[in-house]
Amino acid sequence: MISTANGFPVITDGSSHLLHTWLIPTREGTLNLRLRRGSVGFLIAHYALWFADTIEPLIGRVTDDWGWAPLRPIRGYRDVSRETSGHARYRYSEHCGGRAADLNATRHPLGRRGTFTALQSARIRARLLIYRGCLRWGGDYRRRADEMHIENVATIPASERIARALLNSPRGRRLIAVNPSQKDVILS
């Protein structure tokens, strides 16, 4: 089985039943993010809605927000520990598992630090506390900044606990109102 860098299963076209196109009801319009269905996707969608409400709009002239991507290796990363027969193998992004989203990618290019103000960065880090370790921001990567990136790094049971706690929050209710099928998945 192919897995992401964090050890979660990659979702291929043949297993797309594990994905959901999350509708994010921002003030500027509805954003569609293809993410894992249920709790994992809900937490990323919840964060994206907060981001759009608090940090910066997600809907604009450029479509630069995305989630799931099939078999997408982490750019520039070669996993030497997985080399076989002299052929390099690559680590796959959490996007391959529907466990990550990039928000306003053109404003926050890969490898650049400081694309957010100090106040915005502080707000992002403070916000992550409500997700209790389920989400990680690419702006905190040590090796190469990825400030556009948010990913779910928790197990499904851990994500379910936090998602259930956030279902009745104002943003949780907004998300479920436009993604009603996901409530049963989260509560199952």
Image (spheres, helix red, strand yellow):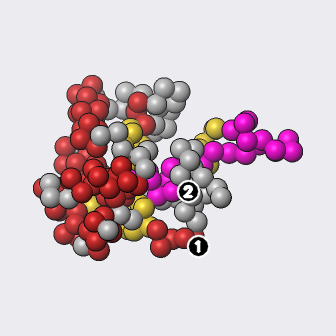
- Span of residues in magenta: 79-101
Element type at marker 1?
helix
- Residue occupying the point 22% across, 48% down: 50
- Magenta highlight on residue 89: yes
Query: Does 83 sit left or right of 126 as displayed?
Result: right
Q: CA distance from mark 2 to mark 1?
A: 13 Å
- Give the mark nearest the N terminus, 2 or 1: 2
Along the line of sight, the residue nearer the viewer: 123 or 62: 123
Mark 2, Cα crowd under 10 Å, few <14 / some 14-19 / many 20+, is some
Q: Which residue is mark 2?
A: 9
Element type at marker 2?
loop
Residue 70, position as x, y percentages in the image:
57, 61
Along the line of sight, the residue nearer the viewer: 26 or 17: 17
Mark 1, Cα crowd under 10 Å, few <14 / some 14-19 / many 20+, is few
Residue 82 in view (yes/no): yes
**The disc labelled 2 sits on which kind of residue?**
Pro
Q: Quadrant of the N terminus?
A: bottom right
Residue 23 in view (yes/no): no
- Residue occupying the point 28% across, 66% down: 187
**The disc labelled 1 sits on which kind of residue?**
Gly
Query: Does 161 sit left or right of 154 as displayed?
Result: left
Query: Does 53 sit left or right of 113 as displayed?
Result: left
Residue 25, position as x, y percentages in the image:
22, 62
**Residue 137 sits above or below residue 101 on the image:** above
**Residue 121 sits above or below residue 135 on the image:** above
Task: Identify the image quadrant of residue 116.
Answer: top left
Q: Which residue is mark 1?
A: 14
- Residue occupying the point 56% across, 56% down: 9
Q: Residue furthest left?
A: 170
